[in-house]
């Protein structure tokens, strides 16, 4: 079960990052999008990220200009599903919508070679539900990467009750070959990280709603008191409030526990279109992205 060529579905933040780490690790990677403009945007992000790596020393994970060119040469963008036919593994990172994902898998199931592995980067949708769209349930797994993909070392490798052990091990080894640290987990909503991270982030919002501290002070408290790289509100804005809100819904629906329920403020911010960094406003105002200003709600 040798993996040589990777297909990536979606060239957004996660898809482009996944394609980048695959190409950096020496794999040929073809990214599928619905329109060329999304490929252009994703590839521009890859260029920018690789340029940052090119500025670093090799000891700090840096690459040379020649390596950058080789990485880019291993990457291909396409809007034609047939270009994924000979992939050994296909990693889906499209919109977090069950129906859209199932439609995509069903279409690719008849195109991509039969022994290829299908993987989903979903953070909260049941991998088991997704595999029902294909005729290869035993060759279906979850591979959950973290944002920003080129920097975050973790990959959650998700096993379903239908996954063949050999497929799981191949995916686990593949994650290692990407230079990541894989962890083993099973198809329980939220896996390991979101199971623990989501209640923490939601509690930060509740603490703010209850007047425990300001947004900046809560962020600083967790950053400086616990050594986290970002405080909870900075991280929420970074992940995207729409994404966080969606995840809370799926998790609350699964567990019916208050710790996964969205606080009213998060819902209202999403209704208002305040999605965090990507929309220019969330818990912070990013009018000047270098100097975000904390809001007061
Ligand atoms: N590609 C390449 N290099 C990058 C980069 C990218 N995309 N983004 C930043 N860098 C580089 C910077 O240029 C800088 O390089 P330098 O040290 O040579 O100057 C270095 O990385 C550090 O960046 P910054 O100084 O800008 O900022 P930080 O030191 O804070 O590091 C961070 C940035 C790695 C994002 C760090 O803040 C962090 O780890 N934050 C937490 C992220 C996190 O928790 N992610 C998980 C989110 S949850 C998730 O994804 C799951 C989903 O299901 C919701």
Image (cartoon, grey):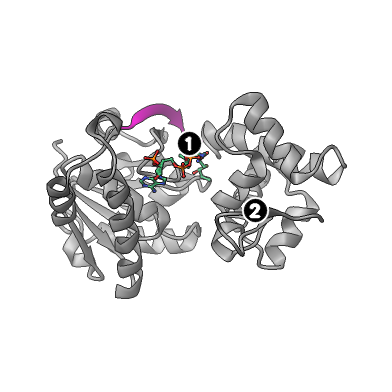
- Outermost residue on the right side: it is 211
Give the percent coordinates (x, y) of residue 132.
Answer: 40, 51
Magenta highlight range? 180-188
The crowding category of the residue bearing disc 1, from other C-alpha atoms within 10 Å (few below 14, some 14 to 19, many at least 20), is: many
Residue 126 makes an appearance in the image: yes
Residue 8 appears left or right of 65: right
Residue 238 appears left or right of 174: right
Of 263 and 209, the residue lying toward us: 209
- Verify whether residue 240 appears in magenta: no
Q: Which residue is mark 2?
A: 245
Location of the C terminus by quadrant is bottom right
- Report which quarter residue 189 is drawn in: top right
Give the percent coordinates (x, y) of residue 60.
Answer: 30, 32
Which residue is at a point 36% across and 29% down the rendered structure image? 182
Give the percent coordinates (x, y) of residue 117.
Answer: 25, 44
Looking at the rendered image, the disc whose residue lies closer to the viewer, 2 or 1, is 2
Location of the N terminus by quadrant is top left
The crowding category of the residue bearing disc 2, from other C-alpha atoms within 10 Å (few below 14, some 14 to 19, many at least 20), is: many
Dominant secondary structure of the magenta stretch?
strand
Q: Which residue is mark 1?
A: 187
> N-terminal of the two: label 2 or label 1?
1
Up/down of 196 relative to 46, above or below: above
Up/down of 176 relative to 113, above or below: above
- Distance between the Cα atoms at labels 2 and 1? 20 Å
């Amino acid at each position: 079960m040798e993996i040589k060529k990777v297909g990536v579905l979606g060239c957004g933040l996660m898809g482009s990052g996944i394609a980048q780490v695959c190409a950096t690790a020496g794999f040929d990677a073809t990214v599928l999008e619905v329109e060329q403009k999304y490929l252009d945007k994703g590839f521009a992000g890859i260029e920018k990220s690789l340029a940052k790596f090119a500025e670093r020393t090799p000891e700090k994970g840096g690459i040379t200009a020649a390596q950058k060119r080789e990485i880019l040469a291993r990457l291909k963008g396409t809007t034609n599903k047939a270009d994924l036919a000979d992939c050994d593994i296909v990693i889906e990172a499209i919109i977090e919508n069950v129906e859209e994902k199932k439609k995509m898998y069903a279409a690719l199931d008849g195109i991509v070679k039969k022994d290829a592995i299908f993987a989903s980067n979903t953070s909260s949708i049941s991998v088991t539900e997704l595999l029902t769209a294909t005729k290869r349930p035993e060759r279906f797994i979850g591979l959950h990467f973290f944002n920003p993909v080129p920097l975050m070392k973790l990959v959650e490798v998700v096993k379903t009750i239908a996954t063949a052990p050999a497929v799981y091990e191949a995916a686990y080894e593949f994650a290692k070959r990407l230079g990541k640290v894989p962890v083993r987990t099973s198809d329980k909503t939220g896996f390991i990280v979101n199971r623990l991270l989501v209640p923490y982030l939601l509690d930060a919002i509740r603490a703010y709603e209850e007047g425990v501290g300001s947004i900046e002070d809560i962020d600083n408290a967790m950053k400086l008191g616990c050594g986290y790289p970002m405080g909870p509100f900075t991280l929420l804005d970074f992940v995207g409030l729409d994404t966080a809100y969606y995840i809370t819904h799926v998790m609350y629906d699964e567990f019916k526990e208050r710790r996964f329920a969205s606080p009213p403020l998060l819902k209202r911010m999403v209704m208002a279109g305040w999605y965090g960094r990507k929309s220019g406003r969330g818990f912070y105002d990013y009018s000047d992205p270098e100097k975000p200003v904390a809001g007061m709600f």
